């Protein structure tokens, strides 16, 4: 059996990983905003909805990690819904 974060009570590691994912997503969103400002038009596939899904899954993972570290990383499966979110935001 492989060791998990929950087995060794590494809840702070889950929080650090989640914070890292959030910062990376915010950086990517910032980069797309700077690019759009510089070229003076909106990028069609900006990726911002997908980054918002990543931020949401990271926050959810951090919250779950507080109560159940064994299950915290399952929250990142929410990212599989990113293509659906992208299609939904293109229609709106």
Image (spheres, grey):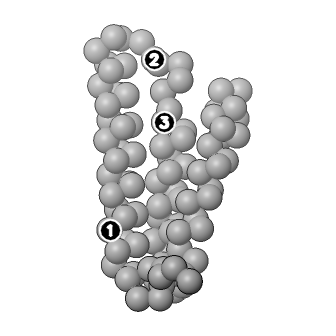
Distance CA(mark 3)–CA(mark 2): 12 Å
- Rendered image quadrant of residue 37: top left
Give SS at disc 1.
helix
Residue 51, position as x, y percentages in the image: 48, 43
- Look at the picture and state if 4 lies above or below 9: above
Instruction: Identify the residue at image location x=33%, y=11%.
Output: 39
Q: Which mark is residue 42?
A: 2
Q: Which mark is residue 24?
A: none
Placement of the C terminus among the 4 image quadrants? top right
Judging by the rendered image, the residue that carries numbered circle 3 is 48
- Look at the picture and state if 60 lies above or below 10: above
Instruction: Identify the residue at image location x=69%, y=32%.
Output: 87
Give SS at disc 3.
helix
Instruction: Identify the residue at image location x=53%, y=19%.
Output: 44
Labels 3 and 1 touching (C-beta < 8 A): no
Q: Nearer the viewer, residue 36 or 51?
A: 51
Distance CA(mark 3)–CA(mark 1): 22 Å
Residue 33, position as x, y percentages in the image: 35, 28
The earlier-in-sequence mark between 3 and 2 is: 2
Q: Is residue 16 left or right of residue 72?
A: left
Residue count near mark 1 (Cα–Cα under 10 Å), binned few <14, some 14–19, many ≥20: few
Judging by the rendered image, the residue that carries numbered circle 1 is 16
Residue count near mark 2 (Cα–Cα under 10 Å), binned few <14, some 14–19, many ≥20: few
Say if residue 66 shows up in the picture. yes
Q: Is residue 58 left or right of residue 32?
A: right
Residue 52, position as x, y percentages in the image: 50, 46
């Amino acid at each position: 059996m492989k060791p998990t974060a929950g087995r060794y009570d590494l809840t702070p590691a889950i929080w650090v990983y989640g914070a890292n994912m959030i910062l990376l997503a915010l950086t990517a969103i910032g980069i797309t905003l700077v690019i759009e400002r510089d070229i003076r038009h909106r990028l069609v596939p900006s990726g911002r909805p997908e980054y918002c899904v990543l931020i949401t899954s990271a926050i959810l993972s951090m919250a779950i990690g507080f109560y159940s570290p064994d299950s915290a990383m399952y929250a990142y499966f929410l990212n599989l819904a990113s293509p659906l979110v992208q299609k939904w935001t293109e229609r709106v």
